[in-house]
């Protein structure tokens, strides 16, 4: 299957700093990328959907100024957690898909664990 | 919330036994997918079943879908220790995004 990478895999930062997480589709061009957040032993909650070259669509309750998403190319999307606080600590997972059919599989990255001290 | 519910939340079995997980959802769907997640890792796609399908097989996996009851089940036959993971169902509604269920944590003991 297609490969999606995330970087970094783990990050620890101080409260108030900003953290950028990269999501790359390594062997295919992603029409759409998705960003999810997962709390320990919980399900994935979709944060936003991003298409290359356009603004991300955020889910209800997700602060767009807090979680900046940039989809600069067909193979790269970034999530920046601005002015991070301890409550932003979580597991962030991206996924990517090609094509627009709802039957198209999403390929998931390995996730990034963010810890804000 | 549109999030689906999975049942049971946790399941512990011995190697060789079958594991059955159930997923219920609330809205009309276009397709339903099952994913596996090993601890602290990303998700691996297992199988997709379309809304007009009732059953699908892939290796030791069998998925059923009952749209009238808004439910699906995942059966893993002859389980192995390597099947230990969390399993999530996710519904697709014809738009691009998926809505994930609450997950079932499966533990397969040797």
Image (tube, coloured by chain):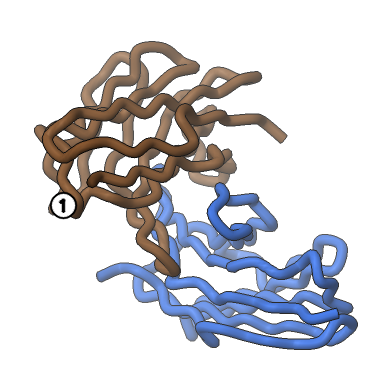
Chain colours: A brown, B blue
With B63 as the anchor, is B79 left or right in this view?
right
Mark 1 nearby-residue class (10 Å; few <14, some 14–19, many ≥20): few
Residue at 55 percent of width and 18 percent of height: A29
Picture coordinates of residue A48 (x, y %)?
28, 40
Q: Is residue B107 left or right of residue A42?
A: right
Picture quadrant where residue A55 is located: top left
Q: Residue at x 44, y 18 (%)?
A: A76
Q: Which residue is drawn at the image coordinates 19% and 51% (left, top)?
A: A86
B82 relative to B29 in the view: left or right: right
- State the image coordinates of residue A58 (x, y, percent, origin top left): 21, 41
Label total for image:
1
Spot occupied by residue B102 in the image (x, y as percentages of width and height): 43, 72
For the point 35% across and 69% down, the residue is B3
- Which residue position holds label 1? A60
**Which of B27 and B15 lies nearest the eye of the viewer?**
B15
Res A64 seen here? no
Q: Is residue A67 visible?
A: yes
Helix, strand or loop status at disc 1: loop
| Image position, residue A40 (x, y; %) | 40, 64
- Between B24 and B9, the one lying in front of the other is B9
Q: Is residue A3 above or below residue B81?
A: above
Q: Quadrant of the N terminus of chain A?
A: top right
User: Chain for mark 1?
Assistant: A
Q: Closer to the camera, B12 or A17?
A: A17
Q: Picture quarter containing residue A109?
A: top right
């Amino acid at each position: 299957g297609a490969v999606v990478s995330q970087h970094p895999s783990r990050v620890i930062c101080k409260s108030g700093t900003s953290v950028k997480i990269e999501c790359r589709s390594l062997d295919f061009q992603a029409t759409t990328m998705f960003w999810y957040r997962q709390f320990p032993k919980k399900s994935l909650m979709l944060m936003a959907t991003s298409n290359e070259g356009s603004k991300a669509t955020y889910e209800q309750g997700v602060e767009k100024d807090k979680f900046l998403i940039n989809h600069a190319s067909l193979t790269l999307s970034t999530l920046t957690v601005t002015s991070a606080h301890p409550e932003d600590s979580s597991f962030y997972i991206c996924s990517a898909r090609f094509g627009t059919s709802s039957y198209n599989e999403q390929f998931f990255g390995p996730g990034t664990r963010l810890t804000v001290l | 919330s549109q999030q689906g519910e999975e049942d049971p939340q946790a399941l512990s079995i011995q190697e060789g036994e079958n594991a059955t997980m159930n997923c219920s959802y609330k809205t009309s769907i276009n397709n339903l997918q099952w994913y596996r997640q090993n601890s602290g890792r990303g998700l691996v796609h297992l199988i997709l079943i379309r809304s007009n399908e009732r059953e699908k097989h892939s290796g030791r996996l069998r998925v059923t879908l009952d749209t009238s009851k808004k439910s699906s089940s995942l059966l893993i036959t002859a389980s192995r220790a390597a099947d230990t993971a969390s399993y999530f169902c996710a519904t697709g509604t014809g738009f691009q995004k998926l809505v994930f269920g609450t997950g079932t944590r499966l533990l397969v003991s040797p």
